[in-house]
Structure formats: structure tokens, C-alpha cells
Amino acid sequence: MAEIKRCPACENLVRPDEEDQWPTYCPLCDSALSGVSPQPEEQPSDPMAAADDEIPATAGTCTCGAPLTQGESCIYCGRNIDCGSTVDSPAPQSGDTSLFILQWPWGDESITIARVFIGRIPPVSPVLAEQLERDYPNVSRLHAEIFQEGGRLFVRDYASTNGTFVNDRRIEPHAATLVQHDDNVRFAASLCAVLRQEQGGRK
């Protein structure tokens, strides 16, 4: 079984090079890896895959767009199924549509909708899902959402396998985390986007 090292700072999974030599520093955050012991690499279970067999045909969908399981809350966004909202913030409203831009590695994307899903299956947009399926398979199938509330931007991790990070700090699953203009958001190990908001003259 292949081995990996987990960076103690950013939790990036590091593998040896073609000559089986371990890098001295993490390629993402430059933290030292000399004191980190290798461990067997196990294929993580994707949260969406684990839920597939549990979803009844008549369960419907949560307000986040994810299929609902039987229970009191959505296993992805954490919203209460009865009211469609969480304790930390209300569900995003369709009227909050300030323009913001996601600066992806492949180019800028102007967003004018209230919520953007990140992942590799619907309700993620087909273009983005195809891009991530091809180039970023360590992003969970339904990984996170970016949404607007009261003219501000938030990101919510859907309990993804490899995590969501804001400025290299891993955020708590299900919690709405405020994202400021020009913050860097990373999904899993290497998918990064810089968020730019255009509102009230800010560009």
C-alpha cells in the first residue's frame, strides 16, 4: 500500500517523488515535514458516496440542493430539514445577488446568483462539475457552497472528506464562514479560488 505524509500545518497529503524520496517541506505551505512519519494511504470514503444507499426515493431535496436522508438535518449543509436553516445563519435569500467573482486556476468566473455549489455532481453546475471531476478528483462530490447573505459572502463546507480552507485555515463543517474580499478559499488539497466582490463601488 502506498504511503503518505500529512502536513501538520495545512493537512495537505504529501507523497514521495518518482524516486521514492520524501520532500523536506510541504509544497503548499512550506511547513517542515522532516518530523512527520509516513502512514498508509487509505482511499477516503466520500460523504456523498456513503449517503447514496441511504437516500429514500421520496426523500426530496434540502434547500442547499442536496438529496435528503431520513433524519432531522441535512448531512451536507447541516440545515434543519423542517425549517431549512441553521442556527448560525439563515438560508441564503434569492434577492441577495451582489456580483462577485471567483478567480479559479483556469480563469475568472463572474457569479450573479445567490448560491454557488462546489463539487462534482448536481446541483453543481455541469461545467464546473466536469472540470473538477477531470482535474480535482479529491474534491468531494458535494463539497461546499458559497453564498451571499446581507451583501456579504460566506462559504459552508458540507463535511467534505478533505476539507475547505479559508486563508489556509480549515473551517468547521456546516458552519457559515464569512469570506472577505480577496480571501483565498481552498477546497481539498489544491483547488483554490480567490473571491472578489463587486458591490458599492468595490472592484
Image (cartoon, helix red, strand yellow):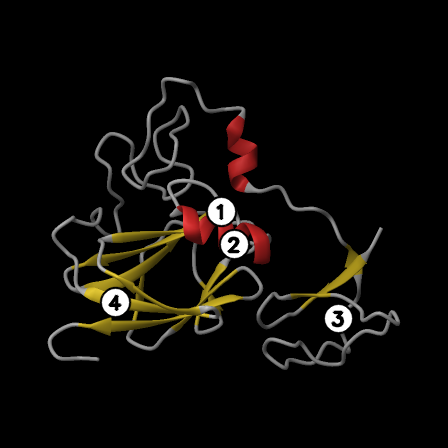
Which three-letter amino acid code belongs to the residue tagged 1? Arg
Residue count near mark 2 (Cα–Cα under 10 Å), binned few <14, some 14–19, many ≥20: many
Q: Is residue 136 visible in this depiction of the protein?
A: no
**197 lies above or below 30:** above
Give the CA distance from mark 2 to mark 4. Answer: 21 Å
Disc 2 on helix, strand or loop?
Answer: helix
C-alpha gap between disc 3 and disc 2: 29 Å
Across and down, in percent, residue 162 comes to 56, 55
For label 4, the SS is strand
Residue closer to the observer: 30 or 136: 136
The amino acid at mark 2 is Leu
Q: Which residue is mark 1?
A: 120
> Which residue is rendered at x = 67% and y = 76% of the image?
26
- The residue at which mark 2 appears reads as 132
Query: Which circle's residue, 2 or 1, is located before the other in the chain?
Result: 1
Which numbered disc, 2 or 4, marks the residue that appears first in the sequence?
4
Kindly indicate whether the residue at mark 3 contacts the one at mark 4 (C-beta within 8 angstroms).
no
Q: Is residue 7 left or right of residue 110?
A: right
Q: Label 2 to label 1, Cα distance in Å?
A: 6 Å
Q: Are marks 2 and 1 in contact (CB under 8 Å)?
A: yes
The residue wearing badge 4 is 100
**Res. 150 image quadrant:** bottom left
Q: Earlier in the sequence, mark 1 or mark 3?
A: 3
**Percent of width and height locating residue 182:** 33, 77
Residue at 76 percent across and 61 percent down: it is 4
* Residue at 15% over, 56% down: 96
